[in-house]
Image (tube, rainbow, N blue to C red):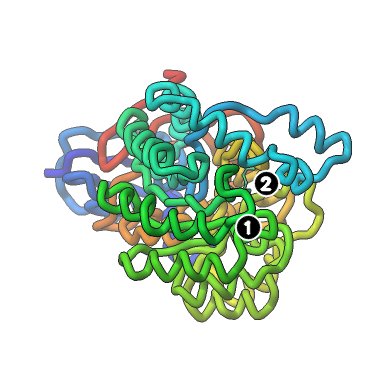
Amino acid sequence: MWDTLIRRAHLLTFDTGSPYGSIRRGALAVQGGRIAWVGPDDELPANSAREEIDAGGALVTPGLIDCHTHLVHAGQRAREFERRLAGSTYEEIARAGGGIRATVAATRAADEEALLAASLPRLRALAAEGVTTVEVKSGYGLNLETELRMLRVARRMGHLAGVMVRTSFLGAHAVPEEFAGRADAYLDFLIAEVLLAAVREGLIDAVDAYCEPIAFSPAQVTRLFGAARKLGLPVKLHADQRSDQGGAALVASFGGLSADHLEYASPEGISALARSGTAAVLLPGAFLFLQETHLPPIGGLRRAGVPLAVATDCNPGTSPLCSILGAVALACTLFRLTPAEALAGVTRNAAAALGLADRGRLEAGLRADLALWAVEEPAELAFRLGPNPLLRRFVAGRSDHAPSD
Ligand code: DI6
Ligand code: FE
């Protein structure tokens, strides 16, 4: 006896056989929070289910995964956007004390409840678009107390919104004011105190860093990653976004989970990613709002067989994008991904970027994280900005309804 059986569904399994792994008239059974059976309706084994859902031809995908976000933060930086539109660069604003440091000031000033209240609506917005797993980074605290507060809020809001949250430690996001001009001393403090305290509290799933001339050098990132690997933590990197820093090869040399951004990644970087099995995370929201014109080397990544993930990078500076379907649409229009690639980027390959082998595809044995959609064609999910076609979500087999219901 199954818990739930969904029939007459258009399943997108994202197995590797065909672009979407589409099964036009499909059925999917759920038992104990896992997918128990998936296949064509007319091959369904004789078995009954406590609840049967006639999908009426609706599209069913794995629950969507946003594998790169900065959802937890306080304040906003819309005036920096105005300044950029008037001609200032992101780097100029950051060097003048704005940018990440402005959000650090606002986040340090917010207590845990205020930070939760500011951040939860962003997670709920993603959940309303079928997201069931989200990665959330720290990195707007840059001191012991606030980094831990961000990570606690990230975990708490996951429970409140019915989303599985994976946390990444991004203490190496910027050098805070109190360490101005002493980046190495800050890194010592970060490794010896903040990272260890967060690990002791069980708050970290991976370690990330911002490798840019305005942030941390490859040598400094190497030091941080060495400490992370000693603690048994996987690493990932904001790599080669504004210039080629050799970030892709660096994170690959640590067997990293993902290299994110990659606008300026070199051919050597791409080969290194392919060899280490590191995923590329493409972030078209940051590309759009920074009015970047240098495209990430999509063709090279594709030819090398690097898994391509897509994420929102939702943050208050460079990517005020809190829509996973928006990220999918932008990945197609700006980066020329096919809709099948972009959707695999927020399912199968996003799971790979988080090192999660139990989700991101529709396959027996995997978690029953599902999204049901009122669309006729898969590409419709990549071809609209605004209307939300989600019918309902299942998280580990349990159904909730879109907030609009
Ligand atoms: N992700 C980041 O962490 C930085 N850029 C990006 O794309 C900076 C975010 C910020 O300006 O707050
Ligand atoms: Fe980011």
Give residue 134's position: percent from left, percent from top.
Answer: 43, 44
**Would you place residue 241 above or below residue 275 in this image?**
above
What's the residue at 88%, 34% (across, down)? 86
Q: Identify the amino acid type marked 2.
A: Ala
Visible residue check, residue 101: yes
| Front one among 27 and 91 | 91
Q: Are marks 1 and 2 in contact (CB under 8 Å)?
A: yes
Visible residue check, residue 154: no
Q: Tag on residue 286? A: 2
Give residue 88's position: percent from left, percent from top.
Answer: 84, 41
What's the residue at 84%, 35% (across, down)? 85
Callout 2: helix, strand or loop? helix
Beta carbon at label 2 within 8 Å of ligand 1: yes
Beta carbon at label 1 within 8 Å of ligand 1: yes
Give residue 18's position: percent from left, percent from top.
Answer: 50, 65
Callout 1: helix, strand or loop? strand
For the C terminus, which image quadrant?
top left
**Figure quadrant of residue 192:** bottom left
Q: Is residue 53 left or right of residue 275?
A: left
Q: Is residue 30 left or right of residue 57?
A: left
Q: Identify the amino acid type marked 1.
A: His
Other-residue count near label 2 (Cα within 10 Å), few / some / many at <14 / 14–19 / ≥20 = many
What's the residue at 17%, 45% (across, down)? 32
For the N terminus, which image quadrant?
top left
Give residue 205's position: percent from left, percent from top.
Answer: 35, 54
**Figure quadrant of residue 371:** top left
Instruction: Return the residue at label 1.
Output: 261
What's the residue at 22%, 39% (across, down)? 4
| Front one among 81 and 19 | 81
- Whole-angstrom CA distance, mark 1 to mark 2, is 8 Å
* Furthest-right residue in this view: 87
**Figure quadrant of residue 99:** top right
